[in-house]
Image: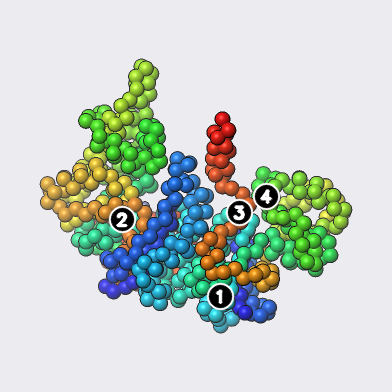
Amino acid sequence: MENLILAIETSCDETAASVIRNGNEILSNVVASQIDSQKRFGGVVPEIASRHHVEQITVVIEEALEKASIVPSDLDAVAVTEGPGLVGALLIGINAAKAFAFAHGLPIIGVHHIAGHIYASALVEPMKFPLLALVVSGGHTELIYMKEHGSFEVIGETRDDAAGEAYDKVARVLNLPYPGGPHIDRMAHEAKKGVDFPRAWLEDTYDFSFSGLKSAVINYKHNLEQRGQSIVPEEVAKGFQDSVVEVLTTKTIKAAKELGVKQVIVAGGVSANRGLRESLSKALEQEGIPFTAPPLSLCTDNAAMIGACAAYMFEAGVRSDLSMNGLPGKELKSWSNTDDKLR
Amino acid sequence: MIWLGIETSNAPLSVAIVRDGEVLSEIVQNTKSTHSVTCMPTIEEVFRKTNLKPVDIDAVAVSEGPGSYTGLRIGVTIAKTLSWTLKKPLVGISSLKVLASNVELFDGIICTMFDARRKNVYAAVYKGKELKTIIPEHHGSLEELLQQLKEYQETIMFVGSDVKKFKEEIQSVLGEQAKFAPPSLNLPRASKLIELAEKEPLPTLEMVHSFVPKYHRLAEAEANWLKAHQKEQKG
Ligand SMILES: [Zn+2]
Protein backbone atom coordinates (compact mmCIF):
# COMPACT_ATOMS: atom_id res chain seq x y z
CA MET A 1 0.00 0.00 0.00
CA GLU A 2 1.37 3.37 -1.01
CA ASN A 3 -0.48 6.56 -0.28
CA LEU A 4 -0.13 9.91 1.42
CA ILE A 5 -3.16 11.30 3.22
CA LEU A 6 -4.01 14.55 4.97
CA ALA A 7 -6.50 13.78 7.73
CA ILE A 8 -8.71 16.17 9.71
CA GLU A 9 -10.69 15.45 12.87
CA THR A 10 -13.05 17.88 14.65
CA SER A 11 -15.77 15.62 16.07
CA CYS A 12 -15.63 16.96 19.62
CA ASP A 13 -13.32 19.47 21.30
CA GLU A 14 -9.97 18.75 19.65
CA THR A 15 -9.04 20.44 16.37
CA ALA A 16 -6.66 17.95 14.77
CA ALA A 17 -4.80 17.37 11.50
CA SER A 18 -2.24 14.79 10.48
CA VAL A 19 -0.30 13.53 7.50
CA ILE A 20 -0.07 9.74 7.25
CA ARG A 21 2.04 7.74 4.82
CA ASN A 22 0.98 4.23 3.76
CA GLY A 23 -1.47 3.88 6.62
CA ASN A 24 1.19 3.30 9.24
CA GLU A 25 3.70 6.13 9.28
CA ILE A 26 2.90 9.35 11.11
CA LEU A 27 4.57 12.30 9.36
CA SER A 28 2.77 14.78 11.59
CA ASN A 29 0.05 14.68 14.21
CA VAL A 30 -1.17 18.08 15.40
CA VAL A 31 -3.87 18.45 18.05
CA ALA A 32 -5.14 21.80 19.34
CA SER A 33 -7.03 21.12 22.53
CA GLN A 34 -9.81 23.33 23.87
CA ILE A 35 -9.64 21.82 27.31
CA ASP A 36 -8.64 25.06 29.05
CA SER A 37 -11.67 26.80 27.61
CA GLN A 38 -14.13 23.92 28.10
CA LYS A 39 -12.94 23.30 31.68
CA ARG A 40 -14.81 26.46 32.68
CA PHE A 41 -18.10 24.76 31.88
CA GLY A 42 -17.37 21.35 33.40
CA GLY A 43 -17.81 19.67 30.02
CA VAL A 44 -17.86 20.29 26.30
CA VAL A 45 -20.30 23.01 25.21
CA PRO A 46 -21.07 22.35 21.53
CA GLU A 47 -21.39 26.01 20.46
CA ILE A 48 -18.08 26.90 22.13
CA ALA A 49 -16.42 23.86 20.55
CA SER A 50 -17.58 24.93 17.08
CA ARG A 51 -16.32 28.48 17.61
CA HIS A 52 -12.89 27.25 18.66
CA HIS A 53 -12.67 24.92 15.65
CA VAL A 54 -13.17 27.86 13.25
CA GLU A 55 -10.38 29.76 15.03
CA GLN A 56 -7.97 26.84 14.84
CA ILE A 57 -8.72 24.88 11.70
CA THR A 58 -6.38 26.46 9.11
CA VAL A 59 -3.59 26.92 11.66
CA VAL A 60 -3.73 23.23 12.58
CA ILE A 61 -3.81 22.01 8.97
CA GLU A 62 -0.92 24.29 8.03
CA GLU A 63 1.14 23.01 10.94
CA ALA A 64 0.43 19.39 9.99
CA LEU A 65 1.60 20.00 6.41
CA GLU A 66 4.67 21.95 7.49
CA LYS A 67 5.76 19.41 10.11
CA ALA A 68 5.40 16.67 7.50
CA SER A 69 7.27 18.80 4.92
CA ILE A 70 4.47 18.12 2.49
CA VAL A 71 2.86 20.33 -0.16
CA PRO A 72 -0.71 19.69 -1.33
CA SER A 73 0.43 18.25 -4.67
CA ASP A 74 2.23 15.41 -2.82
CA LEU A 75 -1.06 14.17 -1.36
CA ASP A 76 -3.29 11.37 -2.66
CA ALA A 77 -6.42 12.25 -0.69
CA VAL A 78 -7.96 14.28 2.09
CA ALA A 79 -9.71 12.37 4.89
CA VAL A 80 -12.06 13.77 7.50
CA THR A 81 -14.24 12.48 10.32
CA GLU A 82 -17.81 12.35 8.98
CA GLY A 83 -19.37 11.23 12.29
CA PRO A 84 -20.43 10.41 14.90
CA GLY A 85 -19.80 13.49 17.00
CA LEU A 86 -21.12 16.98 17.67
CA VAL A 87 -22.67 18.07 14.40
CA GLY A 88 -21.56 21.71 14.58
CA ALA A 89 -18.03 20.59 15.35
CA LEU A 90 -17.95 17.95 12.59
CA LEU A 91 -19.06 20.54 10.03
CA ILE A 92 -15.93 22.65 10.50
CA GLY A 93 -13.56 19.79 9.72
CA ILE A 94 -15.74 18.54 6.88
CA ASN A 95 -16.08 21.89 5.14
CA ALA A 96 -12.40 22.67 5.55
CA ALA A 97 -11.55 19.24 4.13
CA LYS A 98 -13.90 19.71 1.19
CA ALA A 99 -12.56 23.21 0.41
CA PHE A 100 -8.96 21.96 0.62
CA ALA A 101 -9.71 18.92 -1.54
CA PHE A 102 -11.50 21.08 -4.12
CA ALA A 103 -8.69 23.67 -4.21
CA HIS A 104 -6.15 20.96 -5.08
CA GLY A 105 -8.30 18.52 -7.06
CA LEU A 106 -7.93 15.76 -4.47
CA PRO A 107 -10.41 13.00 -3.64
CA ILE A 108 -12.10 13.19 -0.25
CA ILE A 109 -12.82 10.33 2.15
CA GLY A 110 -15.34 10.50 5.03
CA VAL A 111 -14.20 8.37 7.95
CA HIS A 112 -16.21 6.92 10.84
CA HIS A 113 -14.79 8.21 14.12
CA ILE A 114 -14.87 4.80 15.84
CA ALA A 115 -13.27 3.06 12.86
CA GLY A 116 -10.58 5.72 13.24
CA HIS A 117 -10.07 4.86 16.91
CA ILE A 118 -9.65 1.19 16.02
CA TYR A 119 -7.18 1.95 13.22
CA ALA A 120 -4.98 3.88 15.66
CA SER A 121 -3.56 0.42 16.38
CA ALA A 122 -2.39 0.12 12.75
CA LEU A 123 0.01 2.97 13.53
CA VAL A 124 1.61 0.74 16.18
CA GLU A 125 1.70 -2.65 14.46
CA PRO A 126 -0.09 -4.41 11.58
CA MET A 127 -3.62 -5.57 12.40
CA LYS A 128 -4.10 -9.35 12.64
CA PHE A 129 -7.49 -10.72 11.64
CA PRO A 130 -9.91 -11.75 12.90
CA LEU A 131 -9.60 -9.19 15.65
CA LEU A 132 -11.66 -7.83 18.47
CA ALA A 133 -11.68 -4.15 19.39
CA LEU A 134 -12.87 -2.76 22.68
CA VAL A 135 -13.79 0.88 22.05
CA VAL A 136 -14.23 2.89 25.23
CA SER A 137 -14.70 6.66 25.25
CA GLY A 138 -16.94 9.41 26.54
CA GLY A 139 -19.59 8.46 24.00
CA HIS A 140 -18.89 4.79 23.29
CA THR A 141 -18.49 1.40 24.91
CA GLU A 142 -18.49 -1.20 22.17
CA LEU A 143 -17.02 -4.57 21.33
CA ILE A 144 -16.39 -4.75 17.60
CA TYR A 145 -15.42 -7.85 15.65
CA MET A 146 -13.38 -7.40 12.48
CA LYS A 147 -12.99 -10.31 10.08
CA GLU A 148 -10.76 -8.29 7.77
CA HIS A 149 -9.92 -4.70 6.88
CA GLY A 150 -13.10 -2.64 6.50
CA SER A 151 -15.38 -5.22 8.07
CA PHE A 152 -17.06 -4.21 11.32
CA GLU A 153 -19.57 -6.05 13.42
CA VAL A 154 -20.70 -4.54 16.70
CA ILE A 155 -21.21 -7.56 18.96
CA GLY A 156 -21.78 -5.65 22.19
CA GLU A 157 -22.54 -2.08 23.24
CA THR A 158 -23.69 -0.10 26.23
CA ARG A 159 -27.39 -0.02 26.98
CA ASP A 160 -27.19 3.25 28.87
CA ASP A 161 -24.11 5.30 29.79
CA ALA A 162 -20.82 4.96 27.97
CA ALA A 163 -17.89 4.05 30.23
CA GLY A 164 -16.38 7.53 29.83
CA GLU A 165 -19.72 9.11 30.64
CA ALA A 166 -19.88 7.10 33.88
CA TYR A 167 -16.36 8.25 34.71
CA ASP A 168 -17.33 11.89 34.15
CA LYS A 169 -20.47 11.57 36.28
CA VAL A 170 -18.68 9.85 39.15
CA ALA A 171 -15.94 12.48 38.93
CA ARG A 172 -18.60 15.12 39.46
CA VAL A 173 -19.93 13.24 42.51
CA LEU A 174 -16.38 13.29 43.88
CA ASN A 175 -16.02 17.01 43.01
CA LEU A 176 -13.10 16.37 40.66
CA PRO A 177 -12.27 18.87 37.91
CA TYR A 178 -13.20 18.12 34.28
CA PRO A 179 -12.20 15.79 32.66
CA GLY A 180 -12.53 13.47 35.61
CA GLY A 181 -11.33 10.15 34.15
CA PRO A 182 -7.59 10.64 34.70
CA HIS A 183 -8.21 11.83 38.28
CA ILE A 184 -10.26 8.72 39.13
CA ASP A 185 -7.58 6.52 37.57
CA ARG A 186 -4.86 8.20 39.66
CA MET A 187 -6.90 8.10 42.89
CA ALA A 188 -7.78 4.45 42.35
CA HIS A 189 -4.08 3.66 42.20
CA GLU A 190 -3.47 5.56 45.46
CA ALA A 191 -6.16 3.66 47.41
CA LYS A 192 -5.32 0.53 49.41
CA LYS A 193 -8.85 -0.83 49.28
CA GLY A 194 -11.94 -0.04 47.27
CA VAL A 195 -15.61 0.27 48.16
CA ASP A 196 -17.52 -2.82 47.04
CA PHE A 197 -19.78 -1.68 44.20
CA PRO A 198 -21.96 -3.99 42.04
CA ARG A 199 -21.04 -5.30 38.57
CA ALA A 200 -23.68 -5.34 35.83
CA TRP A 201 -23.01 -8.63 34.04
CA LEU A 202 -26.05 -8.77 31.69
CA GLU A 203 -25.64 -12.52 31.24
CA ASP A 204 -25.59 -14.10 27.74
CA THR A 205 -24.76 -10.88 25.98
CA TYR A 206 -21.72 -8.75 25.29
CA ASP A 207 -23.69 -5.61 26.11
CA PHE A 208 -22.74 -3.28 28.95
CA SER A 209 -24.57 -1.14 31.48
CA PHE A 210 -22.98 1.46 33.73
CA SER A 211 -25.90 3.57 34.97
CA GLY A 212 -26.59 1.21 37.92
CA LEU A 213 -22.99 1.52 39.04
CA LYS A 214 -23.17 5.28 38.82
CA SER A 215 -26.35 5.26 40.97
CA ALA A 216 -24.66 2.95 43.48
CA VAL A 217 -21.84 5.46 43.89
CA ILE A 218 -24.30 8.32 44.39
CA ASN A 219 -26.33 6.29 46.94
CA TYR A 220 -23.21 5.26 48.81
CA LYS A 221 -22.14 8.88 49.24
CA HIS A 222 -25.66 9.96 50.15
CA ASN A 223 -26.08 7.24 52.81
CA LEU A 224 -22.80 8.06 54.50
CA GLU A 225 -23.61 11.76 54.48
CA GLN A 226 -27.01 11.07 56.05
CA ARG A 227 -25.19 9.43 58.94
CA GLY A 228 -22.93 12.45 59.25
CA GLN A 229 -19.94 10.58 57.82
CA SER A 230 -17.92 11.42 54.74
CA ILE A 231 -16.56 9.22 52.00
CA VAL A 232 -12.91 8.42 51.33
CA PRO A 233 -12.75 9.62 47.69
CA GLU A 234 -9.80 7.34 46.82
CA GLU A 235 -11.69 4.26 48.02
CA VAL A 236 -14.78 5.26 46.04
CA ALA A 237 -12.62 5.86 42.95
CA LYS A 238 -10.99 2.46 43.31
CA GLY A 239 -14.29 0.68 43.95
CA PHE A 240 -15.84 2.31 40.89
CA GLN A 241 -12.86 1.72 38.62
CA ASP A 242 -12.52 -1.92 39.75
CA SER A 243 -16.14 -2.55 38.79
CA VAL A 244 -15.83 -0.91 35.35
CA VAL A 245 -12.52 -2.59 34.57
CA GLU A 246 -13.60 -6.06 35.70
CA VAL A 247 -16.73 -6.02 33.55
CA LEU A 248 -14.87 -4.65 30.49
CA THR A 249 -12.03 -7.16 30.87
CA THR A 250 -14.20 -10.21 31.54
CA LYS A 251 -16.49 -9.54 28.56
CA THR A 252 -13.57 -8.80 26.25
CA ILE A 253 -11.79 -12.03 27.20
CA LYS A 254 -14.98 -14.06 26.81
CA ALA A 255 -15.65 -12.64 23.34
CA ALA A 256 -12.02 -13.00 22.26
CA LYS A 257 -12.01 -16.69 23.21
CA GLU A 258 -15.40 -17.48 21.73
CA LEU A 259 -14.58 -15.80 18.43
CA GLY A 260 -11.03 -17.14 18.30
CA VAL A 261 -9.48 -13.80 17.45
CA LYS A 262 -5.79 -13.32 16.70
CA GLN A 263 -5.55 -9.85 18.25
CA VAL A 264 -7.38 -7.67 20.75
CA ILE A 265 -7.23 -3.89 20.40
CA VAL A 266 -8.32 -1.34 22.94
CA ALA A 267 -9.26 2.08 21.56
CA GLY A 268 -10.86 5.38 22.51
CA GLY A 269 -10.22 8.03 25.15
CA VAL A 270 -10.89 5.76 28.15
CA SER A 271 -8.27 3.30 26.86
CA ALA A 272 -5.75 5.80 28.23
CA ASN A 273 -6.87 4.48 31.64
CA ARG A 274 -3.98 2.68 33.36
CA GLY A 275 -6.23 0.38 35.38
CA LEU A 276 -7.97 -0.87 32.25
CA ARG A 277 -4.72 -1.35 30.29
CA GLU A 278 -3.07 -3.33 33.07
CA SER A 279 -6.10 -5.54 33.59
CA LEU A 280 -6.61 -6.29 29.87
CA SER A 281 -2.95 -6.87 29.22
CA LYS A 282 -2.62 -9.29 32.15
CA ALA A 283 -5.76 -11.26 31.32
CA LEU A 284 -4.95 -11.50 27.59
CA GLU A 285 -1.39 -12.58 28.29
CA GLN A 286 -2.76 -15.44 30.37
CA GLU A 287 -4.94 -16.47 27.42
CA GLY A 288 -2.05 -16.08 24.99
CA ILE A 289 -3.93 -13.56 22.81
CA PRO A 290 -1.86 -10.66 21.36
CA PHE A 291 -2.97 -7.31 22.75
CA THR A 292 -2.44 -3.84 21.28
CA ALA A 293 -2.99 -0.66 23.24
CA PRO A 294 -1.86 2.39 21.22
CA PRO A 295 0.12 5.07 23.09
CA LEU A 296 -1.99 7.59 24.97
CA SER A 297 -1.56 10.29 22.30
CA LEU A 298 -3.28 7.99 19.78
CA CYS A 299 -6.09 6.97 22.18
CA THR A 300 -7.57 10.40 22.74
CA ASP A 301 -9.09 12.09 19.68
CA ASN A 302 -6.51 12.76 16.96
CA ALA A 303 -6.34 12.92 13.17
CA ALA A 304 -3.56 10.35 12.72
CA MET A 305 -6.04 7.55 13.43
CA ILE A 306 -8.43 9.01 10.83
CA GLY A 307 -5.59 9.05 8.30
CA ALA A 308 -4.63 5.46 9.11
CA CYS A 309 -8.19 4.29 8.56
CA ALA A 310 -8.56 6.40 5.40
CA ALA A 311 -5.44 4.82 3.91
CA TYR A 312 -7.20 1.45 3.81
CA MET A 313 -10.42 3.03 2.57
CA PHE A 314 -8.44 4.77 -0.18
CA GLU A 315 -6.96 1.43 -1.29
CA ALA A 316 -10.43 -0.12 -1.28
CA GLY A 317 -11.68 2.69 -3.55
CA VAL A 318 -13.98 4.29 -1.00
CA ARG A 319 -14.67 7.96 -1.86
CA SER A 320 -17.01 10.69 -0.68
CA ASP A 321 -17.91 13.84 -2.59
CA LEU A 322 -18.33 17.56 -2.03
CA SER A 323 -21.87 17.10 -0.74
CA MET A 324 -20.62 15.24 2.34
CA ASN A 325 -22.52 16.28 5.46
CA GLY A 326 -21.75 15.87 9.15
CA LEU A 327 -23.49 12.78 10.51
CA PRO A 328 -23.76 13.10 14.31
CA GLY A 329 -25.22 9.59 14.63
CA LYS A 330 -23.32 7.90 11.79
CA GLU A 331 -23.50 4.13 11.92
CA LEU A 332 -20.38 2.00 11.73
CA LYS A 333 -20.76 0.27 8.37
CA SER A 334 -18.36 -2.08 6.65
CA TRP A 335 -16.69 -0.91 3.47
CA SER A 336 -15.30 -4.30 2.45
CA ASN A 337 -17.82 -5.92 0.12
CA THR A 338 -16.96 -9.52 0.99
CA ASP A 339 -18.50 -8.95 4.38
CA ASP A 340 -21.04 -11.50 5.49
CA LYS A 341 -22.69 -11.73 8.85
CA LEU A 342 -20.98 -13.51 11.66
CA ARG A 343 -24.05 -15.46 12.72
CA MET B 1 -9.00 40.68 -10.71
CA ILE B 2 -11.15 37.58 -10.16
CA TRP B 3 -13.25 37.27 -7.01
CA LEU B 4 -15.06 34.34 -5.46
CA GLY B 5 -17.92 35.40 -3.19
CA ILE B 6 -19.59 33.14 -0.62
CA GLU B 7 -22.74 34.07 1.31
CA THR B 8 -24.22 31.52 3.74
CA SER B 9 -25.09 33.74 6.69
CA ASN B 10 -28.74 32.68 6.79
CA ALA B 11 -31.04 30.18 5.06
CA PRO B 12 -30.42 31.49 1.50
CA LEU B 13 -27.20 30.58 -0.28
CA SER B 14 -25.32 32.59 -2.87
CA VAL B 15 -22.02 32.05 -4.64
CA ALA B 16 -20.54 34.16 -7.42
CA ILE B 17 -17.45 34.66 -9.51
CA VAL B 18 -16.82 38.24 -10.65
CA ARG B 19 -14.03 39.32 -13.01
CA ASP B 20 -13.01 42.98 -13.07
CA GLY B 21 -16.40 44.08 -11.82
CA GLU B 22 -18.32 41.87 -14.24
CA VAL B 23 -20.44 39.00 -12.92
CA LEU B 24 -19.37 35.80 -14.71
CA SER B 25 -21.60 33.45 -12.82
CA GLU B 26 -23.85 33.73 -9.81
CA ILE B 27 -26.12 31.32 -8.01
CA VAL B 28 -28.78 32.54 -5.60
CA GLN B 29 -30.76 29.89 -3.86
CA ASN B 30 -33.53 29.95 -1.30
CA THR B 31 -34.32 26.31 -0.64
CA LYS B 32 -34.38 24.37 2.60
CA SER B 33 -31.15 22.53 1.82
CA THR B 34 -28.32 22.71 4.34
CA HIS B 35 -25.28 24.79 3.45
CA SER B 36 -22.96 21.99 4.51
CA VAL B 37 -24.36 19.81 1.72
CA THR B 38 -24.88 22.47 -0.98
CA CYS B 39 -22.22 25.14 -0.53
CA MET B 40 -19.15 23.30 -1.88
CA PRO B 41 -21.02 21.71 -4.84
CA THR B 42 -22.39 25.18 -5.68
CA ILE B 43 -18.88 26.64 -5.60
CA GLU B 44 -17.73 23.81 -7.85
CA GLU B 45 -20.60 24.64 -10.20
CA VAL B 46 -19.71 28.33 -10.62
CA PHE B 47 -16.12 27.36 -11.36
CA ARG B 48 -17.27 24.80 -13.94
CA LYS B 49 -19.62 27.31 -15.59
CA THR B 50 -16.88 29.92 -15.86
CA ASN B 51 -14.21 27.45 -16.97
CA LEU B 52 -12.02 28.70 -14.19
CA LYS B 53 -9.88 26.73 -11.77
CA PRO B 54 -9.56 27.45 -8.04
CA VAL B 55 -6.01 28.80 -8.56
CA ASP B 56 -7.34 31.39 -11.03
CA ILE B 57 -9.03 33.52 -8.39
CA ASP B 58 -7.28 36.53 -6.87
CA ALA B 59 -9.36 37.08 -3.73
CA VAL B 60 -12.20 35.62 -1.70
CA ALA B 61 -15.11 37.56 -0.19
CA VAL B 62 -17.36 36.14 2.51
CA SER B 63 -20.36 37.30 4.49
CA GLU B 64 -18.95 37.46 8.00
CA GLY B 65 -22.14 37.83 10.02
CA PRO B 66 -24.32 38.28 11.85
CA GLY B 67 -26.66 35.41 11.07
CA SER B 68 -27.14 31.73 11.82
CA TYR B 69 -24.11 30.51 13.77
CA THR B 70 -23.81 27.29 11.79
CA GLY B 71 -24.45 28.99 8.45
CA LEU B 72 -21.77 31.59 9.14
CA ARG B 73 -19.26 28.97 10.20
CA ILE B 74 -19.75 26.91 7.05
CA GLY B 75 -19.21 29.91 4.74
CA VAL B 76 -16.31 31.25 6.77
CA THR B 77 -14.61 27.84 7.11
CA ILE B 78 -14.79 27.26 3.35
CA ALA B 79 -13.66 30.83 2.57
CA LYS B 80 -10.82 30.65 5.09
CA THR B 81 -9.58 27.30 3.85
CA LEU B 82 -9.67 28.29 0.17
CA SER B 83 -8.06 31.62 0.89
CA TRP B 84 -5.32 30.13 3.08
CA THR B 85 -4.44 27.18 0.85
CA LEU B 86 -4.63 29.16 -2.42
CA LYS B 87 -2.74 32.07 -0.78
CA LYS B 88 -5.34 34.69 -1.77
CA PRO B 89 -6.57 37.46 0.52
CA LEU B 90 -9.87 37.11 2.31
CA VAL B 91 -12.29 40.02 2.81
CA GLY B 92 -15.23 39.80 5.20
CA ILE B 93 -18.31 41.97 4.78
CA SER B 94 -21.27 42.40 7.11
CA SER B 95 -24.11 40.15 6.01
CA LEU B 96 -26.55 42.96 6.87
CA LYS B 97 -24.70 45.34 4.58
CA VAL B 98 -24.71 42.78 1.75
CA LEU B 99 -28.48 42.70 2.00
CA ALA B 100 -28.74 46.50 2.22
CA SER B 101 -26.73 46.85 -1.00
CA ASN B 102 -29.66 45.21 -2.86
CA VAL B 103 -31.52 48.51 -2.50
CA GLU B 104 -28.55 50.86 -2.39
CA LEU B 105 -30.14 53.11 -5.01
CA PHE B 106 -33.00 53.85 -2.65
CA ASP B 107 -32.70 57.46 -1.52
CA GLY B 108 -33.63 57.11 2.13
CA ILE B 109 -32.95 54.99 5.15
CA ILE B 110 -32.36 51.26 4.75
CA CYS B 111 -32.88 48.82 7.59
CA THR B 112 -31.82 45.19 7.25
CA MET B 113 -32.56 42.57 9.86
CA PHE B 114 -32.47 38.89 10.71
CA ASP B 115 -34.66 37.18 13.26
CA ALA B 116 -32.64 36.42 16.43
CA ARG B 117 -35.65 34.88 18.26
CA ARG B 118 -37.47 36.05 21.41
CA LYS B 119 -38.44 39.35 19.72
CA ASN B 120 -34.79 40.16 19.15
CA VAL B 121 -33.11 40.93 15.85
CA TYR B 122 -29.69 41.30 14.33
CA ALA B 123 -30.04 44.62 12.56
CA ALA B 124 -28.24 47.54 11.00
CA VAL B 125 -29.38 50.83 9.50
CA TYR B 126 -27.79 52.57 6.53
CA LYS B 127 -28.35 55.74 4.55
CA GLY B 128 -29.15 55.03 0.92
CA LYS B 129 -26.94 55.63 -2.16
CA GLU B 130 -23.66 55.39 -0.23
CA LEU B 131 -24.66 52.90 2.43
CA LYS B 132 -23.32 55.06 5.19
CA THR B 133 -23.83 53.24 8.50
CA ILE B 134 -26.28 55.03 10.78
CA ILE B 135 -26.87 52.25 13.31
CA PRO B 136 -24.12 49.63 13.21
CA GLU B 137 -24.71 45.88 13.15
CA HIS B 138 -25.97 44.75 16.52
CA HIS B 139 -28.11 42.28 18.40
CA GLY B 140 -31.03 43.84 20.25
CA SER B 141 -34.76 44.11 20.75
CA LEU B 142 -36.96 44.89 17.76
CA GLU B 143 -39.00 47.32 19.83
CA GLU B 144 -36.02 49.47 20.73
CA LEU B 145 -34.86 49.52 17.13
CA LEU B 146 -38.27 50.64 15.88
CA GLN B 147 -38.42 53.43 18.45
CA GLN B 148 -34.99 54.62 17.29
CA LEU B 149 -36.11 54.50 13.66
CA LYS B 150 -39.24 56.52 14.39
CA GLU B 151 -37.04 59.48 15.37
CA TYR B 152 -35.68 59.79 11.83
CA GLN B 153 -39.00 60.95 10.38
CA GLU B 154 -37.90 59.64 6.99
CA THR B 155 -39.05 56.78 4.82
CA ILE B 156 -37.39 53.55 5.88
CA MET B 157 -36.94 50.60 3.54
CA PHE B 158 -36.92 47.21 5.28
CA VAL B 159 -34.96 44.44 3.56
CA GLY B 160 -34.55 40.75 4.33
CA SER B 161 -36.48 37.47 4.24
CA ASP B 162 -37.20 37.70 7.96
CA VAL B 163 -38.83 41.15 7.71
CA LYS B 164 -42.24 39.64 6.91
CA LYS B 165 -42.31 38.03 10.37
CA PHE B 166 -42.23 41.49 11.94
CA LYS B 167 -44.31 43.41 9.36
CA GLU B 168 -47.25 44.02 11.69
CA GLU B 169 -45.11 45.27 14.52
CA ILE B 170 -43.10 47.49 12.18
CA GLN B 171 -46.24 49.01 10.70
CA SER B 172 -47.85 49.54 14.09
CA VAL B 173 -44.89 51.67 15.18
CA LEU B 174 -43.85 53.32 11.92
CA GLY B 175 -47.06 53.34 9.88
CA GLU B 176 -46.56 54.95 6.47
CA GLN B 177 -42.93 55.62 7.27
CA ALA B 178 -42.15 51.92 6.61
CA LYS B 179 -41.61 50.54 3.11
CA PHE B 180 -40.87 46.93 2.28
CA ALA B 181 -38.51 45.62 -0.38
CA PRO B 182 -40.00 43.23 -2.97
CA PRO B 183 -39.20 39.52 -2.31
CA SER B 184 -36.63 39.36 -5.12
CA LEU B 185 -34.50 41.90 -3.27
CA ASN B 186 -34.73 40.08 0.04
CA LEU B 187 -32.12 37.48 -0.87
CA PRO B 188 -28.45 38.24 -0.38
CA ARG B 189 -26.34 38.09 -3.56
CA ALA B 190 -22.70 37.10 -3.61
CA SER B 191 -22.10 39.55 -6.50
CA LYS B 192 -23.17 42.43 -4.25
CA LEU B 193 -20.94 41.01 -1.52
CA ILE B 194 -18.01 41.16 -3.96
CA GLU B 195 -18.91 44.73 -4.99
CA LEU B 196 -18.64 45.78 -1.35
CA ALA B 197 -15.45 43.75 -0.82
CA GLU B 198 -13.78 45.46 -3.78
CA LYS B 199 -14.08 48.79 -1.97
CA GLU B 200 -12.18 47.44 1.05
CA PRO B 201 -8.40 47.33 1.36
CA LEU B 202 -7.04 43.81 0.82
CA PRO B 203 -5.90 42.29 4.14
CA THR B 204 -2.55 40.49 4.30
CA LEU B 205 -2.44 36.71 3.94
CA GLU B 206 -1.44 36.38 7.61
CA MET B 207 -4.88 37.70 8.56
CA VAL B 208 -6.62 34.60 7.19
CA HIS B 209 -5.83 32.30 10.14
CA SER B 210 -7.44 34.63 12.67
CA PHE B 211 -10.54 35.32 10.57
CA VAL B 212 -13.71 34.34 12.47
CA PRO B 213 -17.41 35.06 11.98
CA LYS B 214 -18.85 38.14 13.66
CA TYR B 215 -21.54 36.45 15.74
CA HIS B 216 -22.47 39.67 17.60
CA ARG B 217 -23.42 37.47 20.53
CA LEU B 218 -21.52 35.38 23.03
CA ALA B 219 -22.37 31.70 23.23
CA GLU B 220 -24.93 31.26 25.99
CA ALA B 221 -22.58 29.22 28.21
CA GLU B 222 -19.87 31.85 27.79
CA ALA B 223 -22.25 34.68 28.73
CA ASN B 224 -23.44 32.80 31.83
CA TRP B 225 -19.88 32.00 32.82
CA LEU B 226 -18.83 35.65 32.50
CA LYS B 227 -21.81 36.75 34.58
CA ALA B 228 -21.00 34.25 37.34
CA HIS B 229 -17.31 35.08 37.17
CA GLN B 230 -17.82 38.83 37.43
CA LYS B 231 -20.07 38.27 40.47
CA GLU B 232 -17.38 36.11 42.02
CA GLN B 233 -14.76 38.81 41.50
CA LYS B 234 -16.96 41.51 42.98
CA GLY B 235 -18.07 39.39 45.94
ZN1 LIG C 1 -13.18 9.70 20.12
Foreground pick, A203 / A182: A182
Residue appearing at x 69%, y 71% in the figure = B199
Sequence order check, earlier mark of 3 and 4: 4
**Same subunit: marks 1 and 4:** yes
- Give the residue type that dot 3 points to: Tyr
**How crowded is the residue under tag 4: few (<14 C-alpha within 10 Å), some, or many (20+)?**
many
Tell which residue pokes out farthest to the top in this image: A227
Check disc 1 and give the amino acid type. Answer: Glu
**Residue B215 image label:** 3
Label of residue A34 in the image: none
Q: Nearer the viewer, residue A330 or B39?
A: B39
Query: Which residue is located at x 54 percent, y 69 percent?
Result: B205
For residue B139, which numbered disc appears in the image?
4
Task: Name the residue that disc number 1 marks.
Answer: B45
> Dot 3 lies on which element?
loop
Residue B90, given in percent of the width and then of the height, sits at 58, 68
- Does ligand 1 reach within 8 Å of label 2's beta carbon? no
The amino acid on which the numbered mark 2 sits, given as a three-letter code, is Leu
Up-down relation of residue B122 to residue B198 (above or below): above
Indicate the amino acid at tag 4.
His
Q: Chain of mark 3?
A: B
Q: Is residue A333 left or right of residue B216?
A: left
